[in-house]
Amino acid sequence: MSSYDLMNKSLTTNSIRRRYYTILFLVWFATSLPLSLSVLLAQARGIGLAEVGLALGVYSLTIVALEVPTGGLADAVGRKRVALLAFALAALYNLAFLFAFSFPTLLLAMILYGVSRALSSGALDAWFVDALQAADPTIDLQPALAGAETVSLLALGLGTLLGGLLPRLFTALPPDGTAVLTPLAIPIVAALIVKLLLVVAVAVLIHERGAGRPWHGRLVAETGAGFRAVPGLVGDAAQLSRANPRLLLLMSASFVAGLAVISLEALWQPHFAGLAGATGSAAPTPLLGVIMAGSFVAAMGGNLLAGRLSRGLGGRHALVGALSRLLEGASILALAVAGALIPAAGFFWLAYLMGGVGLSPHAALLNAEIPAERRSAMLSVQSLASYLGSFLGGAVLGAVAERVSIPAAWLIAGALTVVSLVPYLILDARRDRAEGDRGSEQLLQQP
């Protein structure tokens, strides 16, 4: 028996859960601390909404560009090593953002963050499952994974709320836009400290097989092989999409979804700060934390509601997708014209609720069209479609918000979201026709 197996035998499943949940909490707590304030900080430093949107788009493209090349790194060089690298880069992102007084520095920060997110995707999740199964081969993973989801949501909620409160505790600092350390910059500093603690926690709490083996050569080889595999995977996925019009319809819907989400994420902070009547100050920040936390709850509720809607409509996932896009787009349109804080917050949450409703029906439709042997490539192309929408939405709608107004950008995003129900209606109509054809064939076969 190897030292790795002996180590896992000595760890109870409860001990493994505590280690993983501690790290998971730190990850999402640090991530959420600046979530409700980062755009306001960039604006206070003279960075326009068009530049903020473009930087968010580049962040999205960085993730999808590295998704395939880094996909095998954790298995090749070790989950712990990849996680340590990812979280160290995440800390560098916060450091770069802290000193971002210009667009190039902001862009550098977002690229670092994108690389970090691409590297961290699934690395410790895989360690957690392997460690649990090594400790107890008969374990039911569902409760452990559900507990991880609960910890993540708790960390997101607490971090968002605390991040909104922190600037009010440091009002004696210089005004925002005039120095590195200002009230709105404090959540960035707090996130940096938590991420440094996270690196230490991973180093101390995570143990895995082969930790002492040389890995530098494998790191270069695996990354190079990943980049060389990208053209073939994309070409294969493109060929499959051309042969299956239903996939093209779903990809177009993913593209618009990315555009709509980035328009909300990039623009909601200055819009709600303006509605609160305190743009450029720390006064509205607790309220912004509450609004952001509410959006997490709404998206989670929408995800839970999706199953009931699909069952109630007889498993017509495409119809559920169409309804969610209609109501999500209508919510964004209503948000654009809402002139008061409370109704605007309600429409903002409703948009996230309906976005959550559409996630699992879309995933079910997509996976039903993908052959198992091509699933990985097609899911990567699906991500690419969504992130391309994010990139275009961040660049174009950010410019519209800066040159015209935020409501004008949301009117465009809302209208496009409503139009994106068309692919789902086409898919639902084709489903009805297919069922009708099957019924006709059965009648003809009867004696």
Image: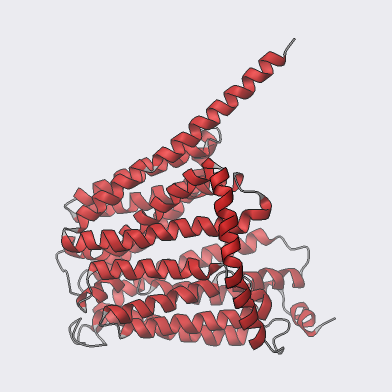
Give coordinates of residue 377: x percent, y percent.
59, 58
Residue 30's image quarter? bottom left
Give coordinates of residue 148: x percent, y percent.
57, 66
**Is residue 206 visible in this depiction of the protein?**
no
- The residue depicted at 67 percent of the width and 51 percent of the height is 372
**Which of 406/23 is in front?**
406
Q: Residue furthest right?
A: 1
Q: Quadrant of the N terminus?
A: bottom right
Identify whether 239 is placed above or below 42.
above
Q: Which colour scheme is used?
A: secondary structure
Q: Quadrant of the C terminus?
A: top right
- The residue depicted at 79 percent of the width and 82 percent of the height is 6
Q: Residue furthest left?
A: 277
- The residue depicted at 47 percent of the width and 86 percent of the height is 196
Q: How many marks?
A: 0
Q: Is residue 260 left or right of residue 42?
A: right
Identify whether 165 is placed above or below 443.
below
**Is residue 107 visible in this depiction of the protein?**
yes
Q: In this view, does 296 lie to the left or right of 27?
A: left
Residue 130's image quarter? bottom right
**Which of 232/276 is in front?**
232
Q: Is residue 173 left or right of residue 436?
A: left
- The residue depicted at 27 percent of the width and 55 percent of the height is 345
Give coordinates of residue 279: x percent, y percent.
17, 69
Residue 77's image quarter? bottom right
**Which of 50/35 is in front?**
50
**Which of 334/112 is in front?**
112
Give coordinates of residue 104: x percent, y percent.
31, 80
